[in-house]
Image: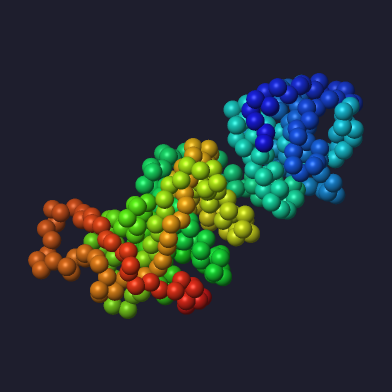
Amino acid sequence: MITLEMVNAFESYDGVSDLFRGDVIPNALNVKILGYYDHKNLLHIAIESNVDSFKSIEINGMSVLFQNINTENQGSFSALVFTCRSNAFKDYFIKIINEILHKTLKGGSIEGNTPYIIDNWLYFLNLPIKDKLTSDQILGLVGELLSLESFCKLGMSVDLAIDAWQGPFGAKRDFMFKSVEIEVKASSKQSGHIHKINSLEQLSFEEGEKVLVYSWNIYRDRSKKSPSIVDIVNRIRDEHLITPSQLSEFNSRLYEVGLDLRDFNDYLSDRFQISSYFICRVSENFPRITPDSFKNKLSKRIGNVEYDIDLNGFLELDIKDIVSEIH
């Protein structure tokens, strides 16, 4: 892990000498990684690379070039040289390189993971920063992310699952498939699957519509062994997102919800464990309140109606069957 304290202690290279000493950065990849400042006080981190070629990357704040470098302490070697072009970008620069190293430890190559991670960051870097999520918003998003992940694990096309995830854009349900609509509910209550319904329309449906509720009971856990929302996001990216378009569509939804990559460090302490989950169908016998539940039409002066439902022990459907039907 590269830290700001480590980076601030790097030595300077005059940019003229044939040989120079860079600060060696220990790493689990067993490759040479050196850090240094040049004569313009620009931060560089060189990671050993043996590819024949690499398409240079340049974005606001940083660049990546393939170069041969000569050093006194590490000899000559080819490397991807990451350059931080602005001190104001230094924090992001360090986070990006750490993420590239972390992803490469799990698989792939430095050369392949670098453009993927930078593209991931570039989406957020070009957008205004949003307010951080509240505790309840984080819990709700965890439920939606776990639902998305479960669909992919059960064999649903990643493109289909992400395209159907419309809740972040204000759709009527969280997941909108052609044949079924799915509302995700997450609760951290010790009493189990008790959820707040936010409007009379949330569980209403027209004749012929198939509406399901994906219910999650998730408890908060301070143990570092439990995943944070950041870990869940990274797990989905690492295990299911392959193409740049999938990454872009996924990121667009995270941003719409308010989960900004630049704020990830602020969400690391809030961790979660799944207690139980199931999926059920909203039918006429489902515990709900809709506009049709009232003998007289509600006054327009009533702006909204919220209520809780208890789904503990409710009739469950087989999630595998649901996913196979959606195919």
- Give the answer, above or below, for where 156 lies relative to 29: below
Q: Is residue 184 rendered to the left or right of residue 78?
A: left
> Residue 43's spot in the image, x, y percent?
71, 28
Q: Residue furthest left?
A: 296
**Residue 90 sits in quarter:** top right
Identified at 65% across, 25% down, the residue is 5
Q: Is residue 60 rendered to the left or right of residue 184?
A: right
> Residue 33's spot in the image, x, y percent?
78, 36
Number of marks in picture:
0
- Give the answer, above or below, for where 35 lies relative to 197: above
Identified at 10% across, 68% down, the residue is 295
Q: Is residue 56 rendered to the left or right of residue 118?
A: right
**Residue 25 sits in quarter:** top right
Identified at 67% across, 45% down, the residue is 102
The answer to whether residue 306 is seen in the rendering is yes
- Give the answer, above or below, for where 60 lies relative to 314: above
> Residue 321's spot in the image, x, y percent?
47, 76
The answer to whether residue 62 is seen in the rendering is no
> Residue 240's spot in the image, x, y percent?
60, 60
Identified at 40% across, 59% down, the residue is 216
The residue closer to the viewer here, 29 or 48, is 29
The residue closer to the viewer here, 212 or 220, is 220
Q: Quadrant of the N terminus?
A: top right
- Give the answer, above or below, for where 110 lies relative to 170: above
